[in-house]
Image (spheres, rainbow, N blue to C red):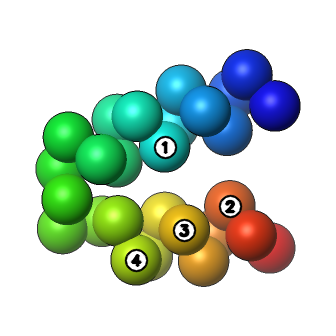
Amino acid sequence: MQLLVEKFDQVKADGDFLPLATTSDCE
């Protein structure tokens, strides 16, 4: 889960990819 958290953190910084990354992570 560490990877997911790290990726989420990076996505949060972008903000634009927030919804897209969330869907990818959920999958």
* Amino acid type at image mark 1: Phe
* Contact flag, marks 1 and 3 (Cβ < 8 Å): yes
Judging by the rendered image, the residue that carries numbered circle 3 is 22
Q: Position of residue 6 (x, y in %)?
A: 53, 26
Q: At numbered mark 2, what does the secondary structure look like: helix, strand or loop?
A: helix
Q: Position of residue 21 (x, y in %)?
A: 49, 64
Mark closer to the chain start, 1 or 3: 1
Q: Position of residue 2 (x, y in %)?
A: 73, 22
Q: CA distance from mark 2 to mark 1?
A: 8 Å
Mark closer to the chain start, 4 or 2: 4
* Contact flag, marks 3 and 4 (Cβ < 8 Å): yes
Occupied quadrant, residue 23: bottom right
Indicate left or right for 19 with 8 as reference: left
Q: CA distance from mark 3 to mark 4?
A: 5 Å
Q: Which mark is residue 8?
A: 1
Q: At numbered mark 4, what does the secondary structure look like: helix, strand or loop?
A: helix
Label 2 CA crowd tier, 10 Å (few <14, some 14–19, many 20+): few
Q: CA distance from mark 1 to mark 3?
A: 8 Å
* Amino acid type at image mark 4: Pro
Label 1 CA crowd tier, 10 Å (few <14, some 14–19, many 20+): some
Q: Quadrant of the C terminus?
A: bottom right
Q: Which mark is residue 19?
A: 4
